[in-house]
Amino acid sequence: MKKILVLMLAFFMLPVAIFAYTINLGIVTTPHSFHYMAAKKFKDIVESSSHGDIKVNIHHSKSVGSETSILQQLQLNALQMGVITAGPIDKFVPTIKAIEFPFIFDSFAKADKILDGKIGQKILKNFQSANLVGYHFLENGFRNITNSKKPIHSASDVKGLKIRVMNSQLQIDIWKDIGANPTPMPWPIYTQLSQHVIDGQENPLAVIDQYKLYEVQKYLTLTRHVYSALVFVGSKSFYNSLPKKYQKLLFKATKEASIYERKLNRDKAAFFLADLKKQGMIIDEHPDMASFKKRVAPLKSRFSGDAKKYLDEILAQ
Ligand code: EAX
């Protein structure tokens, strides 16, 4: 009788023992997005390398809230990981503004050099003071402006347009200085664009295409005004609860998933531009970039502390 009891207990205990750790990972985008593909790669690496000891659940399509809310939940260990756009992170890690400044990166190579170099590593370390872990940068892409009202060739064409921006003071300031009427709003924003609550928005070509914004935005201008990074962000208290071997595994898996996602994104860049043309968008491929750069240059004077130090270092390279 006793033997049967022990066997039954073992059997019922079994499911609990399978996953020593569960990682709930939040993203605001759909399974078609690069954010999701990076999260899936991370999940595959972590689950296979931990031989099933760690389970990763991906909560996509804003099912666990906006990027700002995901960051707040990470601070409380209500979520354990997220793939978050750099923009909204600046409220939690102010130094990240240095890599969100307009027109500082003119190529993927320059962005990689900074983000994967000393400055990027210092910024990722700064996540600690917000009770977060900055694991690795990955890529949203160069941001371009779209709108439903008129062609935008130079900064003066933006005057008065209601442009949705990310929940980030720097992004609000950028578009205010360019002359728009910026409105911070969490992603996604298709409905607000279709109802003309806002006239335009700015995002990488992949996002514009994957969210079919060509259905509600007639004009696209290739401003490439900000290189938009994504970050694998984690809960610091969850990280501290892990054995060393799994702490190392999370850094290894986020690095591999980030490199994998950057390549995916870059390999499809030409496809997205061609598809947006095919979908009928009116595209200005050679805007008056000097007019945009002139408008945002004074923004530098509003930087201070380490954010200013890092920005100066980037501009000096
Ligand atoms: O995919 O909120 C935004 O505009 C961000 O670019 C987000 O990653 C959308």
Image (cartoon, rainbow, N blue to C red):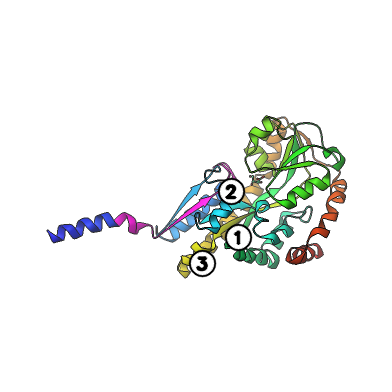
Query: For the point 63% across and 63% down, which residue is it?
Result: 124
Question: Where's residue 65, x and y in %?
Answer: 56, 46
Is 214 colored magenta in this rendering?
A: no
- Circle 2 sits in a helix, a strand or a loop, which is it? helix
How far apart are the alpha carbons under marks 1 and 3?
13 Å
Q: Which residue is mark 2?
A: 35
- Circle 1 sits in a helix, a strand or a loop, which is it? strand
Q: Nearer the viewer, residue 288 or 240?
A: 240
Outermost residue, left side: 1
Quarter of the rendering containing residue 16? bottom left
Q: Residues within 10 Å of mark 2 (few under 14, many from 20)?
A: many
Query: For the point 49% across and 48% down, which residue is it?
Result: 58
Which kind of residue does numbered mark 3 sit on?
A: Lys
How far apart are the alpha carbons under marks 1 and 2?
13 Å
Q: Residues within 10 Å of mark 1 (few under 14, many from 20)?
A: many
Q: Which residue is mark 1?
A: 136
Q: Nearer the viewer, residue 314 or 108?
A: 314
Let me know if residue 261 appears in the view: no
Is 16 colored magenta in this rendering?
A: yes
Quarter of the rendering containing residue 259? bottom right
Which kind of residue does numbered mark 2 sit on?
A: His
Q: Earlier in the sequence, mark 1 or mark 3?
A: 1
Q: Residues within 10 Å of mark 3 (few under 14, many from 20)?
A: few
How far apart are the alpha carbons under marks 2 and 3?
22 Å
Which kind of residue does numbered mark 1 sit on?
A: His
* Label 2 residue near ligand 1, CB within 8 Å: yes
Question: Where's residue 183, x and y in %?
Answer: 72, 42
Region in magenta = 14-35
